[in-house]
Amino acid sequence: MPEKPITDFDQLISMVKSGKKKRLAIASAEGGEIIEAVKEAMKEGIISAVLIGNQGKIEELCHKQELEFKEVEIINEPDPKLTAKTAVQMVKQGRADMLMKGKVDTSTLLKAVLDKESGLRTVAFLSHVAAVEVKAYPKLMLVTDGGMNIKPDIKQKADIIKNAVEVAKKLGISKPKVSCLAAIELVNPDMPETIDAAGLVKMAERGDIQDAIIDGPVAFDVAIDAESARMKGINTVVAGDTDIFLMPDMASGNILVKSLIYLADAKVGGVVVGGGVPIVLLSRSDSAAIKLCSMALGAAIC
């Protein structure tokens, strides 16, 4: 754990560079922005890479990006299903520290990860955590879950929080503040997320969720702005100082993060946690910069 909390991606990349270089296995790596991000990540000293997929296409893309073949390991496997299995096996065998989804479908990669006999599934619950750096907020926002669990119930939300807390710890936040987000701060039977939020607060009070300060239901303005809380007459320690933003469902998390990317020029890195190793799981529209930030986040929490 770093001595001080990591508050932006420059600090995160510096921390990763100071440690042991992590080895990243990429399933179906034949994508221009994938190779561009790999080149930059290797230049920064964040990772070494194993590129699994159609060797001819990968070599062609490496040539375009002026990435020397000798700097990476290329495994020729044109079948997407087998690229996922190969990447997972490399991790199981200790030949890679983390996984990344390339052009392979998310379902195909996760099927290989979750395979009972040959996969990586542990007793933990899989969830997605996005680290978001935006100029208007003084530290990284850990938004969860905008990429894995569609409509989690309260038990799943508790596991999602626990996973995010472990990520926060790796970023130097020993006891992160969690806002269980909703449209209002009152429990309303017609708004299930408010009921879940109140239940999660009680679970934390009883020790079922540890190493975190949890409040909810909390509206987004209160979570990010102490003055908004004051104006509303709401007294909560998470106001303007939230580390983990628990979303009501996947859609709201996905919309929030993409809104910040496109409207607020946010830097974002996202990983799936709970599978034993970080899984860099990206959207097809994600830029090379987002891929780089995601690789750095994955390397930081290995």
Image (cartoon, rainbow, N blue to C red):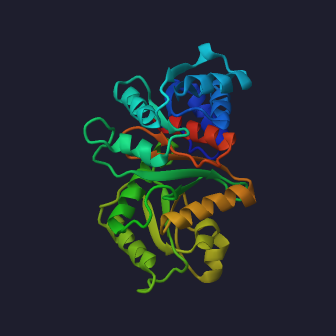
Residue at 43%, 31% in the rendered image: 87
Residue 275 appears in the figure: no
* Above or below, 154 relative to 122: below
Give the total of numbered labels: 0
Query: Which quarter of the picture shows residue 62?
Result: top right
Residue at 48%, 67% in the rendered image: 249
Residue 83 position, x and y percent, is: 45, 32
Residue at 72%, 21% in the rendered image: 66
Query: Which quarter of the picture shows residue 223?
Result: bottom right
Residue 39 position, x and y percent, is: 66, 27
**Quadrant where the C terminus lies?**
top left
Residue 282 position, x and y percent, is: 56, 46
Residue 114 appears in the figure: yes
237 or 9, which lies in front? 9
Query: Which quarter of the picture shows residue 92?
Result: top left
Residue 40 position, x and y percent, is: 68, 29
Residue 12 as seen in the image, left or right of residue 104: right
* Above or below, 98 relative to 195: above
In the image as oriented, which residue stretches furthest toward the top? 70
Residue at 59%, 43% in the rendered image: 6
Residue 148 as seen in the image, left or right of residue 35: left
